[in-house]
């Protein structure tokens, strides 16, 4: 029998849980436990009498206690470990604590602190979460998925740990990323945590430091590649389709050589999504849309430089390109707006070993025939800015300081005074940002429209306090996931993502604060608007299931779970 059933009243949307568990087993089940908040009636009915102190508390009183406990720890890694232990004891309380202290606590479980947790995964391992699917078990994936908790799954986040944040191959430690992403789905998208499943696809690691570590918990083997890797991913996908047919499969932190290839291979045969490519693309594209409106320019008239040609950088280019095509621009013309710079300089004809994902954006040598260059063999960012005169500069390189004073000043010199340069240093964690907002404002004389990947405090420039927009994927993927779990489309289409960008951009308020993305004040409200736009597009395109029973707005509202204790009934 299942451990619990989530029930929802179809008329009111009210929710309750039904479970066969009582007593200690109920107390130890983190999704069901209320701790000291169990009422006197519940303690009697559920076999809990005498198992708890007499005082019956509200969830607000419990939050006060755990917040106090959290602040006794001296560093953020210790705080992360404490929060993960709370997640294993009482999930509702965990989410309530974070929701009530969003700006302070969310960065501890998500970016940027989760990167530190990933590095220490094997040494700090305490309680397993989700499923570990290892390559040696390729013939037993159905058996592994049959062991899942929960049984009913709306969203799966899967990673192979190869491209974690800016720290690369972390092997089994990558499991902390799906756990963190699913927490954000719940906090920012209202997804009931009992319908989510983190999955680690353990295909080995090429990180020798991990392989040499006696405490490393993953498969001690170099990463598999080629046909073996593809067969393993295919077997996992087929098992998901069989065992969790309605699940939204979210790919996370795959390496550059695999991320887009896997997405393209499977995007039409199940509802899947790559956050590093598509989630990043949606948020960055929304910021660019807003910035072009401030400048009263058309998107197709931009000259866009992307410094860093990995999955994120190319994903941003793809998403902006799709928006242009949606506006009636030809794909070939749209792609000519982009100039990608990677480790060997500007991506142009004649470079060796150009990655497959960059090939649609390779520039012809004729495009730069009149340029004055310092080194034609490796065309630098400064060369591109000087000759191209870009309007948009986006960083996805993890190269700190790449957006130097001379680069920014040259960019500003080349633009008319009424055009504000759109500058987006998106690499995180913070220490890997291509530039910091204070410098960008000083170097641009306050003109720059800025969005960053990591959170930055407001900057005082002149007599004005300038708030800094954060280009954080939590503005996109929770809303997309809420839409998918509300109308269950067959796939995530380009049209759905374009409408997500537009819905997100509409929630910014640049004329008041120069913020080219909405503030992360009430992320659930942002997600609901994104979800509505995405769900409506899925219905319009004939991809969604029959929703005659309830209007789409009500389906979304009924899907949302808030971190408050629900009634528990025995079965």
Image (cartoon, helix red, strand yellow):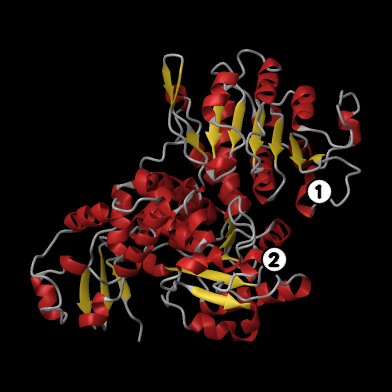
On the picture, is 195 further left or further right than 432? left
Q: Quadrant of residue 24?
A: bottom left
Query: Residue 363 versus residue 336: which sits nearer the camera?
Result: 363
**Judging from the image, what secondary structure is the residue with disc 2 in?**
loop
Task: Report the residue at 72% width, 72% height from top.
Answer: 224
Q: Quadrant of residue 91?
A: bottom left
**Judging from the image, what secondary structure is the residue with disc 1 in?**
helix
Graded by Cα atoms within 10 Å as few (under 14), some (14 to 19) or many (20 or more), the crowding at tag 2 reads some
Query: Residue 119 versus residue 62: which sits nearer the camera?
Result: 119
The answer to which of marks 1 and 2 sits earlier in the sequence is 2
Q: Is residue 241 above or below residue 124?
A: below
On the picture, is 64 further left or further right than 310? left
Mark closer to the observer (1, 2): 2
What label does residue 206 carry, if any?
2
In x, y percent, where is residue 73? 33, 53
On-image quarter of the C terminus: bottom left
What label does residue 10 carry, if any?
none
In x, y percent, where is residue 265? 70, 65
């Amino acid at each position: 029998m299942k451990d619990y059933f989530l029930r929802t009243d179809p008329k009111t949307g009210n929710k309750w849980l039904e479970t066969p568990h009582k007593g200690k087993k109920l107390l130890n089940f983190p999704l069901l436990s209320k701790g000291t908040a169990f009422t006197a009636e519940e303690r009697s009915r559920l076999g809990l009498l005498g198992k708890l102190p007499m005082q019956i508390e509200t969830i607000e009183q419990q939050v006060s206690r755990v917040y106090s406990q959290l602040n006794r720890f001296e560093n953020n890694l210790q705080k992360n470990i404490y929060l993960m232990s709370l997640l294993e004891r009482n999930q509702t309380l965990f989410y309530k604590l974070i929701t009530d202290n969003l700006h302070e606590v969310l960065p501890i479980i998500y970016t940027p602190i989760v990167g530190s947790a990933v590095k220490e995964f094997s040494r700090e391992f305490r309680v397993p979460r989700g499923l570990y699917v290892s390559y040696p078990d390729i013939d037993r994936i159905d058996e592994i998925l049959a062991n899942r908790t929960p049984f009913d799954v709306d969203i799966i986040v899967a990673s192979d740990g190869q491209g974690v944040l800016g720290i690369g191959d972390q092997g089994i430690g990558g499991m902390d990323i799906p756990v963190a992403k699913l927490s954000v789905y719940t906090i920012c998208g209202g997804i009931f945590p009992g319908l989510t499943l983190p999955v680690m696809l353990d295909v080995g690691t090429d990180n020798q430091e991990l392989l040499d570590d006696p405490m490393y918990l993953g498969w001690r083997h170099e990463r598999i590649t080629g046909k073996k890797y593809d067969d393993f991913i295919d077997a996992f996908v087929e098992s998901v389709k069989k065992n969790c047919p309605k699940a939204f499969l979210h790919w996370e932190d795959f390496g550059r050589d695999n991320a887009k290839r896997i997405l393209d291979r499977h995007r039409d045969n199940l509802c899947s999504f790559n956050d590093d490519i598509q989630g990043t693309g949606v948020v960055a594209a929304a910021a660019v849309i807003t910035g072009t409106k401030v400048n009263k320019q058309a998107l197709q008239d931009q000259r866009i430089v992307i410094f860093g040609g990995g999955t994120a950088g190319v994903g941003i280019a793809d998403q902006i390109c799709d928006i242009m095509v949606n506006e009636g621009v030809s794909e070939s013309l749209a792609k000519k707006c982009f100039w990608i710079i990677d480790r060997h300089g500007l991506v142009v004809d004649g470079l060796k070993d150009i990655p497959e994902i960059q090939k649609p954006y390779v520039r012809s040598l004729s495009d730069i025939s009149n340029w004055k260059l310092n080194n034609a063999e490796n065309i630098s960012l400064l060369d591109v800015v000087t000759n191209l005169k870009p309007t948009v500069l986006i960083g996805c390189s993890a190269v700190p300081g790449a957006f130097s004073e001379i680069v920014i000043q040259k960019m500003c010199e080349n633009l008319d005074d009424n055009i504000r340069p759109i500058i987006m240093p998106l690499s995180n964690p913070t220490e890997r940002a291509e530039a910091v907002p204070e410098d960008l404002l000083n170097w641009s004389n306050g003109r720059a429209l800025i969005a960053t990947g990591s959170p930055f405090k407001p900057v005082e420039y002149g007599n004005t306090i300038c708030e800094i927009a954060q280009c954080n994927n939590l503005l996109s993927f929770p809303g997309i996931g809420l839409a998918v779990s509300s109308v269950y489309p067959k796939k995530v289409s380009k049209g759905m993502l374009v409408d997500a960008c537009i819905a997100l951009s509409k929630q910014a308020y640049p004329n008041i604060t120069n913020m080219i993305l909405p503030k992360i004040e009430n992320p659930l409200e942002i997600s609901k608007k994104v979800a509505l736009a995405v769900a409506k597009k899925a219905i319009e395109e004939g991809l969604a299931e029959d929703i005659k029973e309830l209007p789409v707005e009500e389906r979304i509202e009924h899907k949302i779970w808030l971190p408050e204790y629900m009634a528990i009934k025995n079965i």
